[in-house]
Image (cartoon, rainbow, N blue to C red):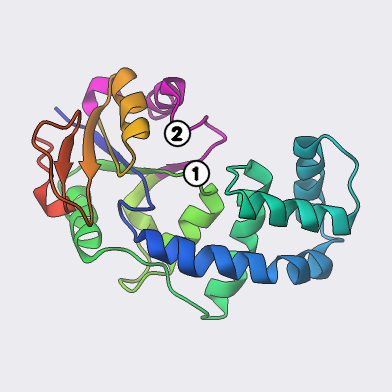
């Protein structure tokens, strides 16, 4: 019996195009200005030092900006970059520059599952901070009260089975009673190896009956019983 659901964001609860065409370009365009405005703040100083450690060099502010831009252009899943993007996106949400995109079926069924007594969690390569920002500023209002917890790459890489074992241990629910939702096969493979149940979201494609994971086009088609 499923006791909790862990969901990915991009391509699962939310449009890939929102992240790729709205959030990422916004962070890239505003990165330099944000760093210069906040460089003296302790939170950002810690983040910049984490980036220096990741790069393995004592980089200046301008060099760090160039390194962040390079990581963005190379689509690197680097934790300091994800944290910085979250801070920049916070400013964008607060200024009303955009709202967090959530599919209608995802918003509906997350609410339904919560009412049915399931605990809901998020696991995304974007920082926990960025995850909360997205769900707090959706067209359906603040959805953050639906979730019992959030996980990012601090728990481990999304294609590594150990990450899912860590999540199961963290939320104290056996893996066999957990359901993971994602649009990425390799993530589902890792979750399955860790003992999770899985559903493969195919938002804009054709369902393949013999796929390695159960495929659905929307949350409406998920049967967790």
Residue 68: where, in percent of width, then height? 72, 53
Q: Residues within 10 Å of mark 1 (few under 14, many from 20)?
A: many
| Quarter of the figure with the N terminus | top left
Q: Are marks 2 and 1 in contact (CB under 8 Å)?
A: yes
Up-down relation of residue 3 to residue 80 (above or below):
above
**What residue appears at the point 82 percent right and 44 percent down from the top-left corner?**
49
Residue 96: where, in percent of width, then height? 51, 81
The range drawn in magenta is 149-178
Q: Which residue is mark 2?
A: 158
Report, in whole angstroms, how far the alpha carbon at label 2 lies from the one at label 1.
Answer: 7 Å
Would residue 89 appear left or right of 67 to someone viewing this image?
left
Up-down relation of residue 58 to residue 193 (above or below):
below
Instruction: Give the number of the disc on residue 125.
Output: 1
Q: Residues within 10 Å of mark 2 (few under 14, many from 20)?
A: many
Residue 112: where, in percent of width, then height? 16, 54
- Taking depth in this image into account, of 75 and 108 the one nearest to the observer is 75
Would residue 7 appear left or right of 86 to someone viewing this image?
left
| Residue 223 covered by magenta stretch | no
Residue 65: where, in percent of width, then height? 79, 58
Up-down relation of residue 85 to residue 209 (above or below):
below
């Amino acid at each position: 019996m499923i006791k909790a659901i862990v969901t990915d964001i991009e391509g699962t609860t939310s449009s890939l195009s929102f992240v790729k065409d709205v959030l990422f370009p916004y962070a890239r365009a505003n990165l330099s200005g944000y760093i210069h405005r906040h460089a003296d703040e302790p939170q950002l100083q810690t983040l910049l030092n984490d980036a220096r450690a990741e790069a393995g060099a004592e980089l200046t502010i301008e060099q760090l900006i160039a390194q962040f831009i390079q990581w963005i252009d190379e689509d690197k899943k680097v934790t300091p970059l994800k944290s910085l993007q979250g801070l920049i996106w916070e400013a964008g949400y607060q200024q009303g520059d955009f709202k967090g995109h959530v599919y209608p079926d995802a918003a509906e069924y997350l609410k339904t599952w919560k009412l049915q007594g399931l605990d809901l969690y998020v696991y995304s390569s974007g920082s926990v901070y960025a995850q909360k920002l997205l769900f707090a500023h959706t067209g359906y209002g603040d959805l953050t009260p639906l979730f019992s917890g959030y996980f990012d790459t601090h728990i481990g890489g999304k294609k590594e089975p150990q990450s899912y074992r860590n999540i199961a241990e963290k939320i104290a629910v056996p893996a066999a009673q957990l359901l993971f939702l994602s649009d990425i096969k390799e993530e589902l493979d890792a979750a399955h190896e860790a003992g999770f149940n899985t559903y493969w979201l195919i938002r804009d494609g054709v369902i393949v009956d013999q796929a390695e994971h159960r495929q659905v086009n929307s949350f409406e088609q998920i049967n967790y019983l």
